Each structure stands twice: as structure tokens, then as C-alpha cells.
Image (spheres, rainbow, N blue to C red):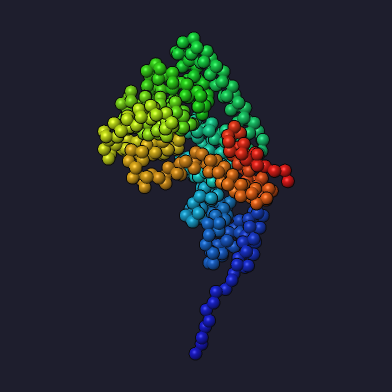
Amino acid sequence: MVSSDYYIQDNSNLEEKTLNAAKGLYQEGKYTEALKLYQGMLNTSISYKLYYEIGRCYYKLNDLLPAEEYFNKSIALEGFKNSSFLYLGNIYYKRSDTKNAIENWAAAYAYKPDDAAVCLNLATSYFSKGMRFQTLFYYEKYLKYAKDKNSSYEAVKTSIDKCNEIANDLLQKARNAIAAQNNKSAIEYLTFAVKNLPISFDLNHLLGKIYLEENDYMHSLIYLKQALCIDNHSLDVLQKLASVYINIGDYTAAYCTMRRLLPLVLHNQAEYLKTIKLVKSLDESFDEYSYQGHKEWAMRYDSENNYHMALIEYENCIIIKENLKEVFGERIERLKSFIKPEERIIKICLEKGGEFYNNGDFKTSNKYFSKAMLMANKNSAEYKLAKSRVVNV
């Protein structure tokens, strides 16, 4: 009678050697040989990093279907901090599927916003779709994070600088026209300025405000919504948007806008009571299907990769019907990560940097604080805090 002892063998050392050998082959451009080693590891290991490496080998061999399969497998195990999104974006772009290319590059940007190549990919893709707001949004990110000041960088910088120069000149002319009580000329100047620089809050805000004064509510709506995309905590923009929505009879949008207003007027009793009264009166007129129009707009914007507008409309759905958070909550968080990933990273860097700083490890804390400074606006409290904690070591 033969007896067998069952035991668990530690293969970690062997796997580490195989992994290092595969990485070496990949770096030497021997993708087929590296792929064989990685695939051999599948018998004993499953991880998002392994699937990612296999996907990369297939990608380098221009075998895109299995590359896509393994990148998706990697994302299924780790769907956030994953470089597979970058390669999936590249694959979709090669197939002329700009919509899905942008979706995946936006996910790569959410994980690593200081990747200048991803920012440039997004900018040029939106340019091909004629979406100037998004194009300039990502071109500015590219200029902020690019380390290689090559000819592409110089071309983009020259173009953006020219847009700013034209917009600022027209803004000054518009202000002069407003001072002369010539709103018609101001509108002409500002309209051209916004076409040059649609990501300017000041231009959109002022143009929306003038159109509102002229009782041209539909044009006012266009520019005030764009201003809201740039700064969703602007009290004046929200107040004017609420007025526009009431005047055009879009009461669900007015309700959502005033709900956004409430936290901003908490310390102004008269304004708060006025707003809460309007909110309650509108709330009573809605039924369980009143969110449908906002859902349709959200999905339309989403399908067009217009994530700023889509986010506003998805949030409107939840404002109107709170239990829709189960339906749209995950997508809302995803869109937020697409648009402002720096906020999350700055917060983490300040927390981590603070821990190492308090423990006297200034070399490590400097890395976190420097990262926070890179991501933050130079006029922000976060930037100033991080800068004040950097220690010469």
C-alpha cells in the first residue's frame, strides 16, 4: 500500500526568478519569449499585475484581441490603480473607436493625472471630435505635467498662450463696452472670446450674466452651465442659473440648482429661508418619474464623452430621487475621478506626508509634499501647506 503526504510547496523564490527573467526579456524586446514565461506562471499565480504583463506582451506583438482580453482581466481584479486602461485606450484608438479610447484614457488619467502622454492623448482625441472645452482642458493639463519640452509641447504652449492673449484682450474690450452700457458689443466680444477659451470661468460667467440681463434665457443657460462645469461652488452662477430655469419653465433643473445653493447660503438667513421655501414648493409638484429628463440628458452627454455635463445631470437625478444613488452612484464617482483626480491625490499626499513629517522622516515626507505641490493650484491652501512642510535634508 502506497501512502502520500500532501504538503504546500513554497514556490515564491522560483516565481520571483521567472518574473525577473520575463521582465528582462520584455525590456530586451523579446516579447514572445517573455510571454511564454508569463503564461507559464498562470499555473501557479493569478494577479492583476501578471495579466497586465501578458497583455503588454500581446500588445507589443500587435496581437490586440488577446491583449484586450488580458487587460480586461487585469482590470477585473484591480479596477482603479491599473495601467491597463492606458493600453486599452490605445487599442480602441487603433480601431478608430474614439469614444471608448477616451473612456479608458480618462480612467488612466484618474489614476495618474500627471501622465503628460495621457493628457495629450485625451486632448487630441477631443480635438478630433470638435469638443473645444475638453480639448483645452486636457491641453492645459499636458502643459502642466509635461517634463519633455519638445516641439509638440512648444506648439501646444504657443497655441494656448495665443488663446489666452486673445481672450484677455476681448474681455477687456467687453468690460469697456459694459461700462458704456453697450451690452450688444460686449456680447460680441465675449462670444468670440469664449470660442477661443471656453475653459475660462470669467468669460462664461460674464457672458451668461449679460444674456440674463437681456432676458435671453437660452443663451444665458449655455454659458452659465459651462461656468458651473468649471466651478460648481459659485454662488452667483447657481443663483443666476436658478433664475434662468424658472424663467424657461424647467422646474426640475431649478429645484436641483437651488438644492446645490442651500449649503452656500446657510449663513445668510434671509437667502436660506427664501431658497428653502422655493425648494419645498417645487418638491411638492414632482412625481417618481420627474428625473427621467435628466437621466436622458446624462446618458446622452455620457455617450459623447462630455463628462462634465453628464456628471451634473446624473447628480440631478439623485437630487430629485435619492434612491437612484444605487443606480447612478458608482458612475458619478467614476466621472468625478475623470474630471478632478488631483483633489483625491492631494488629500492622500498631505495625509501621508504629514505622518512621515511627524515621525521625523523628512526625506519621505518631502516626496509626498512635492507631489501635492505639483497637483495643487499655486494659490490654494493645499499648495501653501505642502510648501511650508518641505524640509531641506
Instruction: Please identify the residue farthest to the right as the structure is shown.
Output: 393
Extreme-top residue of the structure: 180
Residue 276 is drawn in which quadrant?
Answer: top left
Residue 150 appears left or right of 52: right
- Percent across and percent down for residue 117 are 59, 41
Q: Nearer the viewer, residue 112 or 32?
A: 112
Residue at 53%, 43% in the rendered image: 344
Q: Residue furthest bottom?
A: 1
| Image x and y of residue 277, in percent | 32, 30
Along the viewing direction, whichever of 284 and 159 lies nearer the viewer: 284
Q: Is residue 29 above or below residue 179?
A: below
| Quarter location, residue 270 | top left
Looking at the rendering, which quadrant does residue 163 occupy?
top right
Relative vertical location of residue 244 with respect to residue 232 in this rendering, above or below? above
- Residue 14, how many percent across, how many down? 62, 68
Please give the name of the residue rendered at 26% of the width and 33% of the height, measured from the top-left corner: 285
For the point 54% across and 46% down, the residue is: 111
Q: Is residue 107 visible?
A: yes
Lateral position of residue 314 relative to residue 105, left or right: left
Q: Is residue 376 visible?
A: no
